[in-house]
């Protein structure tokens, strides 16, 4: 069963920002990480990822730079900015509200409360205090 396109689109920004909060990365590696995190359930394409990365860059949530690794071709790497970390914290707050509401209407769900959030966002185990919300120049 693949995840519906609407849900993929809604989760795209926090997924990419969460991955970039782990480490700088490039497009193909981000696609692999999403596939790995979702056990292949999230069907992402370059046509979804690259416009999203460009939008996040325009918004100042990520920055990009070209890097060369010996023996490999040049790759455009993306890194999260302070503004991106703040946006990730806000996205997480919003997703926590959505997950909380879903748990209320699905009361018989045998999974532990954080299972869905952890599956969607591996950074859900990090306290929000780790995401600086100010103090950056």
Image (cartoon, grey):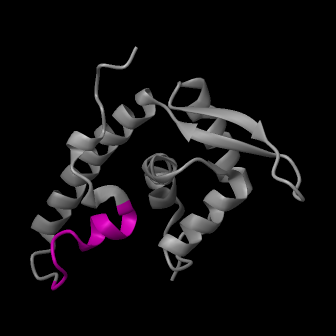
Does residue 59 lie above or below 1 as drawn?
Answer: above
Instruction: Left or right? Give the position of 116 relative to 28.
Output: left
Q: Give the tally of numbered discs.
A: 0
Does residue 35 lie above or below 130 as drawn?
Answer: below
Residue 63 drawn at (x, y percent): 61, 31
Residue 18 drawn at (x, y percent): 44, 51
Which of the image's four quarters has the C terminus? Answer: top left
Residue farthest to the top? 137
5 and 58: which one is in front? Answer: 58
129 and 98: which one is in front? Answer: 129
State whether residue 135 appears in this view: yes
Instruction: Left or right? Give the position of 29 relative to 137.
Output: right
Does residue 5 lie above or below 81 as drawn?
Answer: below
Name which residue lies at 39% across and 36% down: 85
Residue 75 drawn at (x, y percent): 79, 47
Name which residue lies at 16% across and 81% down: 109
111 drawn magenta? yes
The quarter of the picture where residue 94 lies is top left
The quarter of the picture where residue 54 lies is top right
Residue 119 drawn at (x, y percent): 36, 70
132 drawn magenta? no
Name which residue lies at 29% across and 47% down: 92
State whether residue 45 appears in this view: no
Instruction: Left or right? Give the position of 118 relative to 83.
Output: left
Magenta highlight range? 110-122
Instruction: Left or right? Give the position of 46 relative to 20.
Output: right
Does residue 72 lie above or below 3 as drawn?
Answer: above
Name which residue lies at 56% across and 78% down: 40
């Amino acid at each position: 069963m693949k995840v519906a396109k609407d849900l993929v689109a809604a989760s795209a920004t926090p997924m990419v920002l969460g991955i970039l909060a782990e480490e700088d990365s490039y497009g193909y590696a981000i696609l692999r990480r999403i596939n790995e995190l979702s056990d292949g359930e999230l069907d992402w394409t370059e046509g979804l990822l690259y416009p999203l990365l460009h939008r996040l860059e325009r918004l100042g949530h990520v920055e990009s730079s070209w890097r060369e690794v010996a023996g490999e071709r040049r790759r455009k790497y993306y890194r999260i900015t302070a503004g991106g970390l703040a946006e990730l914290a806000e996205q997480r707050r919003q997703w926590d509200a959505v997950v909380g509401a879903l748990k209320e209407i699905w009361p018989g769900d045998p999974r532990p409360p954080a299972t869905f959030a952890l599956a969607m966002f591996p950074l859900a185990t990090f306290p929000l205090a780790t995401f600086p919300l100010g103090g950056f120049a």
